[in-house]
Amino acid sequence: MPAPSRPRKRPTIIVGSVDNSSSSSSSDDEEEEEEEVEDRVDDEDEEKGKGRNGSLSGKGAGKKAPAIIISLKKVCKVCKEEGHQAGFQGANYIDCPRKPCFLCKMPGHTTMSCPHRVALEHGVVPALRKNKQTQLDYVFERQLMSQIPKPRVTSLEFHPTMNSVLLSGDKKGQIGIWDYSKPNEKTVYGSIHSCIVNNMKFDTRNDIMLYTSSSDGTISYTDLETGIGVLLMDINPNGWNGPSTWRMLYGMDINLDKGLLLAADNFGYLYLFDTREKVKIGESILIHRKGSKVVGLHCNPTQPDLLLSCGNDHYAHIWDIRRLETQSFLASLAHGRVVNSAYFSPHTGSKILTTSQDNRIRVWDSIFGNLNLPSREIVHSHDFNRHLTPFKAEWDPKDSSESLAVIGRYISENYNGVALHPIDFIDTSTGHLVAELIDPDLTTISPVNKLHPRDDILATGSSRSVFIWRPGGLKVEDKEAERKKEIIFCNTGKKSAKGKFNESDDDDDGDDFPSKGKNKQQKKYGGKSDKAGSSKSKIVKI
DNA sequence: AAAGTATGCCACC
DNA sequence: TGGTGGCCCTACTT
């Protein structure tokens, strides 16, 4: 990480500035699938006598050039062994057979034959969705500003009371405010943080105020109307002394009852802040393995004394806020790898949902029961972390049964020969995939997703844009097929999203962002685009 | 337009 | 035990 500069006091405010130039469509990158290796290139019969080598210099003129031998062995890209190949074939990725299954991590088979990657029996989805129009209702794309590249979204948060307002935080530290009922109004605060915005929480008692935590090591309390923020906490008071000492804030949550802000860093420490007195409370407390990142914090929605934390040490811990000391956790939830997120259920707070880099979503049905083992483990592809914001399964706050969750999928799906990455809706009480969002406009992996607290709306953040989807009903109540249809229905909801966008785009600011050039970055694969798309996703209950 | 790179974890010694 | 090279489907910049 480059040395983060200190956040400036006065934020930059960019309103409604749109880069239109970048939306010109580029020619199709026809990417040849797998160049057949030429074992031998022989120029013998090529333009014989013309002396390709030597029309100017006499050297070698008239002499036949020796045959050029290129010996390229077909070697697996993954294990470098001969005899097989891994990688994309068309839009399908073939695993290296010498490696454990990419999906479930067990040896003996590959992703394609993984028992967790079963073709769904309901048949309807692959056939139907191919014919559907885009289900985009609004797309916020690349309009942040002209000079600054596309937002790489790292966090999303809906406004607690204003239904059409969504906030986004990104890799650069910018905070975007989108009112999707007014697509032409957007505000970006550029200098609240100097790098990744990891967490945003509204002050629900005064909901124009926003708490944010960032990898720049600060907590900011920002007035969203003016963009003017107060620096509440800076855990690098001595500035930049190299990457090994720089502290970054990842997890953050607000405990309204106790007037507490809790935040945790990449070395395992928890910080407490009194939001009323505006002072830091006590010393930081080691709550995960020393030196390992605390990835997430969540306060229980019904029991103010309970805190949930998760970290890179492969654990999630439940704490009593009244007794926070190293190792004093009430319970410890073991995971196979890094825990990307851990959330109490939104209403009762009695369930726990975690996402781990071992490609499993785990559910504990009751925090009052035996917590030694999760109630369920759901195999799901989300383990890529190096260059991406970690995937996090998020509860649907509208689901009173506390079972529906949304999470982006890493492994791609063959969509008419294009590899796309769906967003999955999972019934965590059964492990079933109840719906998946696949769309030609959704070309990048989407690790950040948030369901609206009241409306049937999904916000998706990816490496280059913020999407708002209106997927119709997402309630978990009917038969699975019904629910799938609801998603498909949403696909058809707008016959021409394009037309709609253009309609609303008569404001002469040159902003036609949603409709133009949106597919230009799609990877096209020369290979067979047949019904390989029916290789359905794999969500399965263990 | 191929090569570089930002970037995080983990295995390895 | 810390330092470091290597990655399993990236995405973007030059």
Image (cartoon, coloured by chain):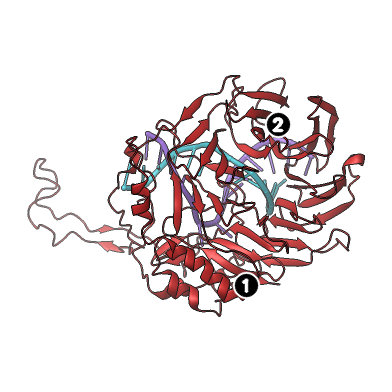
Chain colours: A red, B cyan, C purple
Q: Which circle marks residue A116 in the picture? A: 1
Q: Give the vertical position of A137 relative to A216 (above or below).
A: below
What residue is rendered at 44% in x and 66% in y? Answer: A414
Disc 2: which residue: A247
Badge 2 crowding class, 10 Å Cα cut-off, few under 14, some 14 to 19, many 20 or more, is many
Q: Amino acid at mark 1?
A: His
Q: Which circle marks residue A130 in the picture? A: none
Locate residue A363: give its quadrant: bottom right
Q: Give the vertical position of A368 relative to A190 (above or below).
A: below
Which of the two labelled residues, at mark 2 and mark 1, occupies the earlier sequence position?
A: 1
- Quadrant placement of the C terminus of chain A: bottom right
Picture coordinates of residue A472, whole percent (x, y): 53, 62
Q: Chain of mark 1?
A: A
Q: Give the vertical position of A49 relative to C12 (above or below).
A: below
Which one is in front, A76 or A310?
Answer: A310
User: Relative to A15, is A355 on the left or the right?
Assistant: right
User: In whole angstroms, how far apart are the C-alphas of marks 2 and 1?
Assistant: 39 Å
Q: Amino acid at mark 2?
A: Arg
Q: Give the vertical position of A506 relative to A9 (above or below).
A: below
Locate residue A400: give its quadrant: bottom right
User: Relative to A54, is A525 on the left or the right?
Assistant: right
User: Relative to A500, is A538 on the left or the right?
Assistant: right
